[in-house]
Image (cartoon, rainbow, N blue to C red):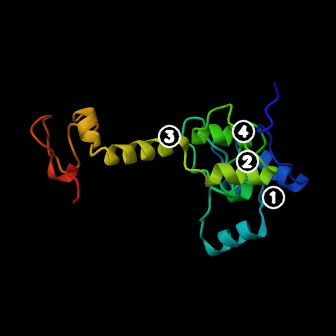
Amino acid sequence: PIDPDHRCPGHSPDVLERIAAIPKDGGSWTDLVPTRPDLLLPSMRSKLERGTMSFCDTYGRMAWKRPAPTIVRRCDHPGNGRYLHPEQDRLLSVREMALLQGFPPEYRFLGTLRQRYAQVGDAVPPLVSRLVALHLLLLKAGLTWWDVLGGRAYPRRLVHEEVFVPGKGQPALLQEVG
């Protein structure tokens, strides 16, 4: 079956040439400086002239063995972040970005292609939403994560090197504010 959300926007020939010149598996526009300076945009040249290499994730490829970037509202153009496919010369599709956010594969987005990208970028990842909802339910029931998980929700050593033992009470860092 064809997935209507596994679509990418079309790009001009100049943009496609720039994308194709960016090294696979983690490259970005900064890699074009020594190899293809003719493909740099005026804004990129300006950054070089000023000696500022900010926004080096624009026109960036994701890397297979690195964490994915934060998916944001304007993830529908390579100039807005590190949203290029690690190997293929294209932006990630709406579906690929949605999977990175934790949406189930069968979830459908509505609207134009730009609106679909915006829906993914604006969304709170589903797993985070579930955890917030569960936390609210626990609070409503007068429980904490500590109560539910019996102290297993936290690592044995905390940032301040405090060691806790289940059943001996919560260290000060973990007590409820109230």
Q: Are marks 1 and 2 in contact (CB under 8 Å)?
A: no
- Marks 3/4: CA distance? 17 Å
Q: Residues within 10 Å of mark 1 (few under 14, many from 20)?
A: some
Which label sits on residue 108? Answer: 4
Among numbered discs 3 and 2, the one appearing first in the sequence: 2
Among numbered discs 2 and 4, the one appearing first in the sequence: 2
Q: Label 3: which residue?
A: 127
Q: Amino acid at mark 1?
A: Leu
Among numbered discs 1 and 4, the one appearing first in the sequence: 1
Q: Is residue 97 above or below residue 175?
A: above
Q: Position of residue 138 (x, y in %)?
A: 33, 43
Residue 40 visible in the shown view? yes
Q: Position of residue 29 (x, y in %)?
A: 70, 55
Q: Are marks 3 and 1 in contact (CB under 8 Å)?
A: no
Which label sits on residue 39? Answer: 1
User: Which element is circle 2 on?
Assistant: loop
Q: Residue 134 occupies which quadrant of the picture?
A: top left
- Marks 1/4: CA distance? 36 Å
Q: Residues within 10 Å of mark 2 (few under 14, many from 20)?
A: many
Q: Label 2: which residue?
A: 22
Among numbered discs 3 and 4, the one appearing first in the sequence: 4
